Image (tube, rainbow, N blue to C red):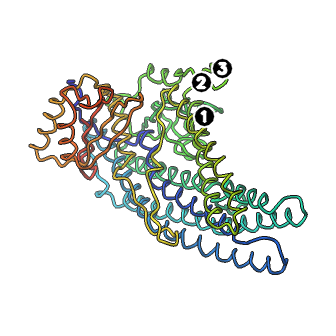
Amino acid sequence: MGTLFRRVTLMLTPEYLEACCDDVLGLYDALNESIVRDISRRIVKTGKVTDSARWQLKQVQESGKLMEEIIQEVASVTKFSDSYISELFNESGVISLKYEGDICSAAGLTPISLKQSPAMMQTLAAAVEKTQGNINNLTMTTAVASQNLYLQYTNLAYMQVASGAFSYQEAIKQAVKAAAVDGGKVLYQKGHSSKLDVAVRRSLLTGVNQTAGKLTEMYADEMDCDYFETTAHLGARNTGTGYNNHESWQGQVFCISGKDKRYRQFREATGYGEGGGLCGWNCRHNFHMFFLGLSKPAYSREVLEGYAKKTHQYKDSSGNIRTLSEYECTQIQRAYERQIRESKSLLAGYDSGIKAAPDEKTENALREEFKTESVNLKKIEAEMKDFCKQTNRAVDSARTQVYAVKDDSGKIVNFNKSVSQKAVWAELKEMAKEKGVEGYTSMKKAELFKEYQEMVDQGKELDCIILYIHMPTGEQETIVNPNVAEKMAYIEKTYNDDLVHAGCADIYITEAFFSEKNDFDRGKTIV
């Protein structure tokens, strides 16, 4: 218990970069659902094929209304996402430079802050504006893409029914399903398209990471530093050749100028500046200054070899035992998550169609599809849960914690954001693990309250308390509560001296963290 109350300083680790986009992506998941609902409702409202001219007139009217609706929804999301993007870039920039400052201090140099460098502040501001513009431009193309989808699938349904190949109900079911799967796409200038959430995440993560990299480069120039060290993480991309294989260069020291032949040249080895390399598309690696003879490598050879050799045994539904690398596990989990998002999109489409159905027969047909897909969603969720349990992975639900607030007509008017900065808290937990601060099954309530009281007596302003609680099902529940005093009072009343719940011996606190409220210039506190 002696190492429980440890203070650490944040850096832009892969864990931070993995989680930092979640709140913004939650906004766009809500937008995507709203778009799917809009398209599905308009498809159903277009009505049955009777007189061709009247049907075409109805189709044009619905198409125009759809375009107007989506433009309004995109505008409402943009208002919130711009604020989140600015907040995220400023937070990550301060965190990154604070860490570089700590490296300089350890090397006996005088660190500089973001406010002391107009050039760095301009770089950060320009990056925020550029990323906001890129994402807003991409998002606005969803209006055109959605209108095209609506026209495509209503025309297809029209032809299927007119030819006698399908009943009206069957044609509508297929149209709603296709629109739900393809809905929420963005269009690029070169003609190809991408799912909305994929495009936003790529743009945002790349922007954050590249901006932090640029600030680090500027810092290194100021300090006359000629070496960088890259970060490392489990499950790094280990496919491809050269710098495309991220596992081949993660957690290592490089010479920036290339003058020191004992170390590989930074850009050449890591592909920094290239789409497939360091800080490229969806890359979660970053880099920091390194001073030979003064800085200590963040990753030992044993740690990196452990990352590369880490495997998991997984028994699939057929009973086959598979040995999977961490990277393969990551890809499988991401595939499950995509299936779940697609299934939820289908359910949103069917639900909207049910509400807009012109007759009972159409409503019942769509309701049957809704029931079938609901069963499928539960099946996929159960499979992913089992996979994550077998491979010791967390089920990531951060994006689902952001909800759209709608008015009586169903339009998005606001978003509620979970109290947390999830990326920061994910980072706190990961750094605690690296420091060996975890698994406090022997933690006593008296020790927790002693540290809490000491922080209160010192005038510390606490941002939140984070609790990891073992549940009767064997799962771990994470509780993040900004009302620290209230939560501590509840713990005092409800848990015994060993932090076991008074009403159930299978419920007990395994880990506890306090996060200190600050502006990141002082770092974060983990206890």
**Callout 3, which amino acid?**
Asn
In the rendered image, the vertical position of residue 113 relative to residue 55, given as above or below: above
- Circle 1 residues within 10 Å: few <14, some 14–19, many ≥20: some
In the rendered image, the vertical position of residue 168 relative to residue 471, given as above or below: below
Q: Secondary structure at mark 3?
A: loop
Q: Secondary structure at mark 1?
A: helix
Residue 120, located in which quarter of the rendered image?
bottom left
**Residue 278: image x %, image y %?**
53, 41
Q: Of the residues tagged 1 and 3, which is closer to the observer?
A: 3
Q: Of the residues tagged 3 and 2, which is closer to the observer?
A: 3
**Callout 2, which amino acid?**
Leu
Labels 2 & 1 near each other (Cβ < 8 A): yes
Q: CA distance from mark 1 to mark 3?
A: 16 Å
| First reached walking from the N terminus: tag 1 or tag 3 | 3
- Circle 3 residues within 10 Å: few <14, some 14–19, many ≥20: few
The quarter of the image holding the C terminus is top left
Residue beneath the point at 27% across and 44% down: 523
- The residue nearer to you, when weighing 460 against 127, is 460
**Residue 331: image x %, image y %?**
60, 35
Mark 2 highlights which residue? 324
Labels 3 & 2 near each other (Cβ < 8 A): no
The quarter of the image holding the N terminus is top left
Numbered tag placed on residue 332 in the rendering:
1
- The residue nearer to you, when weighing 364 against 461, is 364
- Circle 2 residues within 10 Å: few <14, some 14–19, many ≥20: some
Mark 3 highlights which residue? 320
**Residue 217: image x %, image y %?**
43, 47
Q: Secondary structure at mark 2?
A: strand
